[in-house]
Amino acid sequence: MQRVAVNDYTFSDGTMVPRGTTVAVALDSVHLNEKNYPDALTFDPWRFVKLKEQNTTGKRFDIVSTGLDSLSFGHGRHACPGRYFAACELKLMLAHLVMNYDVKLENEGVRPKNMWVASNCVPNPNAKVLFRKRVL
């Protein structure tokens, strides 16, 4: 998550960020933190379903919720206003795939390694994902 300072800013500890400086937050240190998410380095497709079942106080673990432990859409006053639309689009695309296609990786059971582009971790664009249209 990167932002550019539009004005000079001085933090309470005296650290000064000049106008035009790019400031970034290391999301991995939050999203892969064992204090925030148990067994954070292991893929668990049901992680947020389980967390939501444990937390009955509200919508803390909804896909569009923001907080100091969930910064994908930013947080606070400048949180992404399009996150509701983005979440809806993602759900529709996933539902369409699940309902209409059989999907598997070329090497079943082996997830291709991620790639890094600058400071961004992205799926391997050379990985092969196989789709087969279901006959209804």
Image (tube, grey):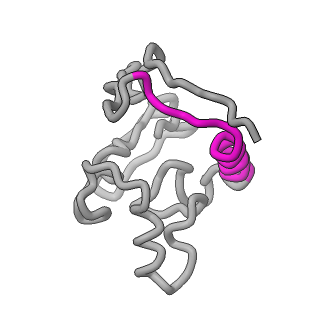
Whether residue 123 sits left or right of residue 85 in the image: it is left
Query: Is 88 part of what is drawn in magenta?
Result: yes
Residue at (48, 36) in percent of width and height? 2
Quarter of the image containing the C terminus?
top right
What residue span does the magenta drawing correspond to? Answer: 85-106
Whether residue 128 sits left or right of residue 27 in the image: it is right
| Percent x, y of residue 61 | 50, 68
Q: Is residue 84 above or below residue 104?
A: below
Choose between 35 and 98: the one closer to the eye: 98
Q: Is residue 86 visible?
A: no
Residue at (68, 31) in percent of width and height? 133
Choose between 50 and 73: the one closer to the eye: 50
Q: Quadrant of residue 70?
A: bottom left
Q: Quadrant of residue 12?
A: bottom left
Residue at (24, 65) in percent of width and height? 35
Residue at (41, 72) in percent of width and height? 51
| Percent x, y of residue 3 | 51, 37
| Percent x, y of residue 24 | 41, 38
Choose between 100 and 128: the one closer to the eye: 100
